[in-house]
Image (cartoon, grey):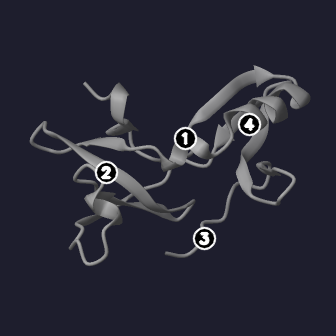
Amino acid sequence: MTETTMPADWVEHRRDDRERLGWIHPSGALYTAVDVLGRVVAADVEWLDAEAALDEHGLAWLAEPWGLRLDDGRVQRVRISHLSPAGLTVVDDDWGAAAAVGAGMLERSLPWPAPAALQPWGGVG
């Protein structure tokens, strides 16, 4: 996947170790904070509040299991294995088997921003 060019008015926000937390972009006279999945974290806030929202949101949540609603309505437990504005890749997570070497994981490529079909594991119903 190649890195997608972000709109010129989107400003990257990184934490102290230079890991990207998301972007901040103008929203009228205020700003919107968008996380690395392309989802809004805070909207119509002051710049410093947008930065604080991304800092608080962090990245740890990316390591958690996710649920991907499939076309047939089933929800597959997955983990995010690759993520960039060019797209993301999830792998099936058979309750920890995704981490096993040679587990023959099924990968799925998803667009960025992440589709609504991808939700935190506890949030997919």
Camera-nearest label, 4 or 2: 2
Left or right: where 45 falls relative to 36 = right
| SS at circle 1 | helix
Q: Distance between the residues labelled 1 and 4?
A: 12 Å
Whole-percent x and y of residue 85? 57, 60
* First in residue order: circle 4 vs circle 3: 3
Q: Tell me the residue that label 4 is attached to.
A: 54
* First in residue order: circle 4 vs circle 2: 4
Whether the residues at callouts 4 and 3 have beta carbons within 8 Å, the answer is no
Camera-nearest label, 2 or 3: 2
Q: Indicate whether 95 appears above or below 86.
A: above
Camera-nearest label, 1 or 4: 1
Whether the residues at callouts 2 and 3 have beta carbons within 8 Å, the answer is no
Task: Count all numbered tags in the image, as a single digit.
Answer: 4
* First in residue order: circle 1 vs circle 2: 1
Q: Tell me the residue that label 2 is attached to.
A: 78
Whether the residues at callouts 1 and 2 have beta carbons within 8 Å, the answer is no
Task: State the residue at coordinates (75%, 58%).
Answer: 19
Q: Nearer the viewer, residue 100 or 122?
A: 100
Camera-nearest label, 4 or 3: 4
Name the mark on residue 61: 1
| SS at circle 3 | loop
The quarter of the rendered structure image containing the C terminus is: top left
* First in residue order: circle 1 vs circle 3: 3
Q: Tell me the residue that label 3 is attached to.
A: 3
Left or right: where 54 falls relative to 104 = right
Camera-nearest label, 1 or 3: 1
Task: State the residue at coordinates (56%, 62%).
Answer: 84
Label 3 CA crowd tier, 10 Å (few <14, some 14–19, many 20+)? few
